Amino acid sequence: LFREGRTAMQAHDFDRACTKFAESQKKEPAPGTALNLGDCEEQRGHLIAATEAFAVAASSFTSPDKQKYATSRAEAAARARSEEHTSE
């Protein structure tokens, strides 16, 4: 499922990619999958889902560098969501 998601991401088929990453994360949770799901959701403009997925990744990684990266992605998605909301 994860590989199918990566292939779909490369083809810019974000709906299929997000579905595959979500299925993979549900079956076998992993921080890398959550990170890819966040990226995918961000590409689709689903910033709430992206923020949540990045937060899951940040809390699951054991490497401080990867935790920091995932946290920064979550914060950036949250900021984008906030800016999008205030411009309406």
Image (cartoon, rainbow, N blue to C red):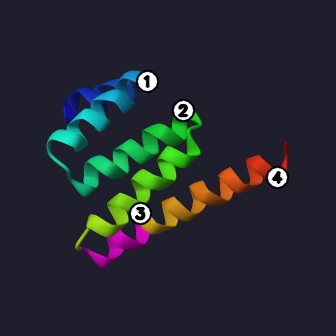
Q: Could you say whether the residue bearing mark 4 is in a helix, strand or loop?
A: helix
Residue 68 within the magenta-colored segment of the rendering: yes
Q: Amino acid at mark 3?
A: Ala
Position of the N terminus, as image quadrant, is: top left
Tell me the quarter of the picture where residue 54 sits. Answer: bottom left
The magenta-colored residue range is: 63-69
Residue at x-position 44% and y-position 27%? 14
Q: Amino acid at mark 1?
A: Asp
Q: In the image shown, does 86 or 36 lie closer to the viewer?
A: 86
Residue pointed to by mark 3: 70
Do the residues under discs 1 and 2 have CB atoms within 8 angstroms?
yes
Tell me the quarter of the picture where residue 82 sits. Answer: bottom right
Answer few, some or many: residues within 10 Å of disc 2's Cα (few below 14, many 20 plus, some between 14 and 19).
some
Residue 15 bears which disc, if any?
Answer: 1
Please indicate whether residue 28 sits to the left or right of residue 78 in the image: left
Residue pointed to by mark 4: 86
Residue 44 bears which disc, if any?
Answer: 2
Q: Amino acid at mark 4?
A: Thr
Q: Mark 1 vs mark 4: which is more N-terminal?
A: 1
Q: Mark 4 vs mark 3: which is more N-terminal?
A: 3
Q: Amino acid at mark 2?
A: Arg
Do the residues under discs 1 and 3 have CB atoms within 8 angstroms?
no
Identity of the residue furthest to the bottom in this view: 64
Residue at x-position 22% and y-position 41%? 26
Q: In the image shown, does 38 or 9 lie closer to the viewer?
A: 38
Do the residues under discs 3 and 2 have CB atoms within 8 angstroms?
no
Q: Which of the two discs, 4 and 2, sits closer to the camera?
A: 4
Q: CA distance from mark 4 to mark 3?
A: 24 Å
